[in-house]
Image (tube, rainbow, N blue to C red):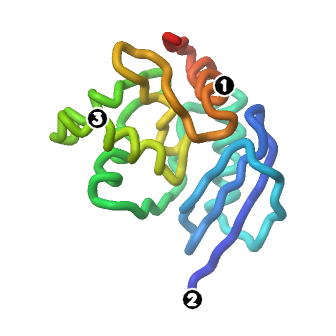
Amino acid sequence: MTEEATRCFDSPIGNIVVKARNNKVVHLTMGGPEVPDVGSAKVLDLAEKQLKNYFAGKSRVLDFDVELKGTEFQRAVWDEISKIGFGETKTYGDIAVAIGRPKAVRAVGGAVGANPVPLVVGCHRVLGSSGKITGYSGGDGLPTKRWLLALEGLRAKE
């Protein structure tokens, strides 16, 4: 039997909604409307604690259990993004080269935009060519990306 739960809490970038299935986080959204908490899961307790510590600058680690569903290509992109550390960035081109698909830069962008767990898979750390800040699907878009990069001590080119 599938057990699902949802947690919503406030953050400096708006409401964070975390959804879990079978005690693994499967979806995270930022800046959307408040939604009621549904059910309970230990992974949601851990996710909320770690995310609040991250936003408060007390932690650089988000290591709660997640389950990523996507195409083989998307999962390769998300895995590569997960290797980017706190306070570091890579370009879409860097990701494409790292997964062995150097001409698939636009497809990498599509996979980044489809990331179901932003912050955990830190897609805010992926920049355009020459380090320019580009699109972001989380929260308020680019202002949220800038805020997250600043939290990590980075300032991207406009």
SS at badge 3 = helix
Where does the N terminus fall, quadrant-wise? Answer: bottom right
Are the residues flagged by discs 3 and 1 in contact, CB closer than 8 Å?
no
Mark 3 or 2, nearer chain start: 2
Q: As displayed, is residue 29 above or below residue 56? A: below
Q: As displayed, is residue 59 above or below residue 128? A: below
* Nearer-the-camera pick, 48 or 113: 113
Please indicate whether residue 54 sits to the left or right of residue 123 in the image: right
- Tell me the amino acid under the disc marked 2: Met
Please indicate whether residue 58 sits to the left or right of residue 120 in the image: right
Closer to viewer: mark 1 or mark 2: 1
Residue bearing mark 3: 105
Q: Residue at x 77, y 55 (%)?
A: 8
* Nearer-the-camera pick, 80 or 145: 145
> Quadrant location of residue 38?
bottom right
For the residues labelled 3 and 1, the Cα–Cα distance comes to: 23 Å
Image coordinates for residue 79, horizontal then vertical, percent? 34, 47
The crowding category of the residue bearing disc 1, from other C-alpha atoms within 10 Å (few below 14, some 14 to 19, many at least 20), is some
Are the residues flagged by discs 1 and 2 in contact, CB closer than 8 Å?
no
Please indicate whether residue 139 sits to the left or right of residue 15 in the image: left
**Outermost residue, front side:** 106
Q: Residue at x 43, y 22 (%)?
A: 88
- Tell me the amino acid under the disc marked 1: Pro
Q: Residue at x 52, y 12 (%)?
A: 158
SS at badge 1 = helix
For the residues labelled 1 and 2, the Cα–Cα distance comes to: 40 Å
Residue bearing mark 2: 1
Mark 1 or 2, nearer chain start: 2
- Residue 143 is marked as 1
Image coordinates for residue 152, horizontal then vertical, percent? 56, 21
Q: Residue at x 81, y 59 (%)?
A: 35
Mark 3 or 1, nearer chain start: 3
